[in-house]
Amino acid sequence: MRHFLVTLALGLAIASGFSAENASTFNVGEFAFQTPTGWESVKVVSSMRKAQFKVSGEGKTSAEVVFFHFGPGGGGGAQANIDRWFGQFQEPKDKLNAKTEEVKVKGRKVTYVQAEGTYLSGMPGEAKTPQPGTMLLGAIVASEEGDVFVKFTGPSALGKASQPAFRKMIEGAAPAK
């Protein structure tokens, strides 16, 4: 009996450690990303989305982080996505404090995008819900296997607080196993 309990406890410890490790790493395209502390993986709501997270803030505020990957040549390219993301705001681009920045990370081009304003939430072709005071943080990770597009949308204060974790996650991407 004692051997059984020890084996059971060891099995549970290994299983829980294995689950925790798998929960913290996820693959999109050719990349393995580490989930930032406090980000909650949620069920993907569209076949276009490859991973989705909820980031909780003060009170009941939260943000959404979505990963997209369409394969080689898919997704419209970096500039088309940047333009689309800026176009998802009510205000014109020059009123959004819109920024783009291209950097090299581990030999790959990463394009960061940032904007703040009234985000028009909703699926393409459907009615939009204005969300004032929203920040968009975006990243486009270049890959010959198809770019990975990452979009964070949520309250501006939460976006600013989450930006270091967002960048660390993007820049820490490793080849998927």
Image (cartoon, rainbow, N blue to C red):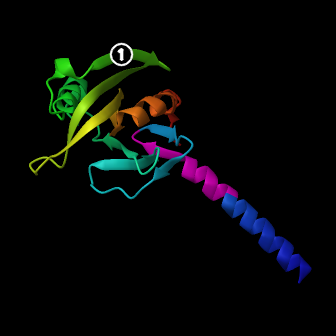
- The answer to whether 28 appears left or right of 83 in the picture is right
What is the quadrant of residue 70 in the picture?
Answer: top left
Residue 30 place in picture, x, y as percent = 43, 38
Instruction: Please report the bounds of the magenta region as a residue range.
Output: 17-29
Which residue is drawn at the image coordinates 39% and 48% (left, top)? 51
> 86 or 3: which is nearer to us?
86
Q: Is residue 166 visible?
A: no
Which residue is drawn at the image coordinates 69% and 56% (left, top)? 17
Q: Which is the main secondary structure of the residues drawn in magenta?
A: helix
Residue 151 place in picture, x, y as percent = 33, 37
Three-letter amino acid code of the residue under disc 1 = Glu
Residue 20 place in picture, x, y as percent = 62, 54
Residue at numbered disc 1: 102
> 79 or 54: which is nearer to us?
54
Q: Is residue 131 visible?
A: yes
| Residue 26 falls within the magenta-colored stretch | yes
Which residue is drawn at the image coordinates 18% and 33% (left, top)? 89
> 126 or 176: which is nearer to us?
126
Residue 65 place in picture, x, y as percent = 38, 43
How many residues crowd around disc 1 within 10 Å: few (fewer than 14), some, or many (20 or more)?
few
Q: Is residue 62 above or below residue 155?
A: below
- The answer to whether 105 appears left or right of 64 in the picture is right
The secondary element bearing badge 1 is classed as: strand
Q: Is residue 155 above or below residue 21?
A: above
